[in-house]
């Protein structure tokens, strides 16, 4: 498929002798919105980490833009894909310094203009004074929104969103989902238990726990 961005082909995930995912296949073309649901321990987050090169598959193949995953391809993924992790521990110190640190990385330079920053902060209902606050002192919901803000400021159109709205109230969950889903050209691969992501334009995939012991 010419416009295919991500493809998992018969992927299996094991932790030690325990297999939690088997024969997982999925093709994600450009502009597709996928919501992946399932109980904890089914390997959902690991599927993201495999693509980013942080974890290895036990079996099967993963492709990005038609290229078989390798350290070099994972490096390309990290330059082109915005990842919002369910881990909100992004660092310490003033939020402004954290944002500047992320955008000091060469591929991200010149992407955080003040107009874009203020626009996204408004969409996420973040007050201007949060930039001067220490990140470690923020609430869980504020930390989560800063993670989303960083992803948006990167100016990318492919997103891996891992429980990105779990700490937000229902109104903000809907607002964040609305803002992501309004972009028809954005490719979204979402892990979430929040119903606000369940829309007509979103394909829902349920993953069941395998929990097999490998011989």
Image (cartoon, rainbow, N blue to C red):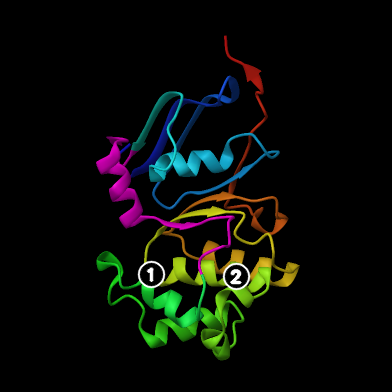
x and y percent of residue 16 in the render? 56, 24
Most foreground residue, 137 or 53: 137
x and y percent of residue 75 in the render? 29, 48
Residue 59 vs 122, above or below: the answer is above
- Residue 2 falls left or right of residue 13: left
**Could you tell me how far apart the alpha carbons at marks 1 and 2 are, in whole angstroms?**
15 Å
x and y percent of residue 45 in the render? 55, 43
Task: Find disc 1 in the rendering and name its residue.
Answer: 102
Work out which quarter of the rendered image holds the N terminus and state it: top left
Residue found at x 42% / y 23%: 60
Residue found at x 33% / y 56%: 80
Q: The residue tagged with tag 2: helix, strand or loop?
A: helix
- Residue 206 falls left or right of residue 1: right
- Residue 84 falls left or right of residue 175: left
Name the mark on residue 131.
Answer: none
Q: Residue 185, located in which quarter of the rendered image?
A: bottom left
Q: Is residue 48 magenta?
A: no
Task: Find disc 2 in the rendering and name its residue.
Answer: 143
| Earlier sequence position, callout 1 versus callout 2 | 1
Residue 95 vs 56, above or below: the answer is below
x and y percent of residue 24 in the render? 52, 27
Residue found at x 68% / y 40%: 40
Most foreground residue, 197 or 155: 155
Q: The residue tagged with tag 1: helix, strand or loop?
A: helix
Residue 116 vs 77, above or below: the answer is below
Label 2 crowding class (10 Å Cα cut-off): few <14, some 14-19, many 20+? many
Work out which quarter of the rendered image holds the C terminus and state it: top right
Bounds of the magenta segment: 64-91
């Amino acid at each position: 498929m010419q416009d295919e961005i991500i493809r998992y082909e018969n992927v299996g995930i094991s932790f030690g002798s325990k297999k939690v995912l088997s024969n997982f296949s999925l093709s994600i073309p450009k502009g597709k919105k996928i919501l992946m649901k399932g109980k904890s321990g089914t390997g959902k987050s690991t599927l993201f980490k495999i693509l980013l090169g942080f974890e290895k598959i036990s079996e099967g193949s993963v492709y990005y833009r038609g290229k078989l995953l390798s350290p070099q391809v994972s490096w390309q993924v990290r330059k082109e894909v915005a990842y919002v992790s369910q881990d909100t521990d992004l660092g310490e110190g003033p939020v402004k310094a954290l944002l500047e640190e992320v955008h000091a990385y060469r591929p991200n330079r010149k992407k955080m203009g003040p107009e874009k920053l203020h626009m996204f902060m408004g969409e996420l209902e973040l007050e201007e004074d949060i930039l001067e606050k220490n990140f470690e002192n923020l609430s869980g919901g504020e930390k989560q929104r800063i993670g989303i803000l960083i992803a948006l400021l990167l100016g990318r159109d492919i997103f891996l969103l891992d429980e990105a709205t779990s700490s937000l109230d229902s109104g903000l969950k809907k607002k964040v989902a609305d803002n992501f889903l309004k972009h028809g050209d954005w490719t979204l691969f979402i892990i979430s238990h929040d119903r606000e992501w369940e829309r007509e334009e979103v394909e829902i995939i349920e993953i069941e726990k395998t929990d097999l012991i490998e011989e």
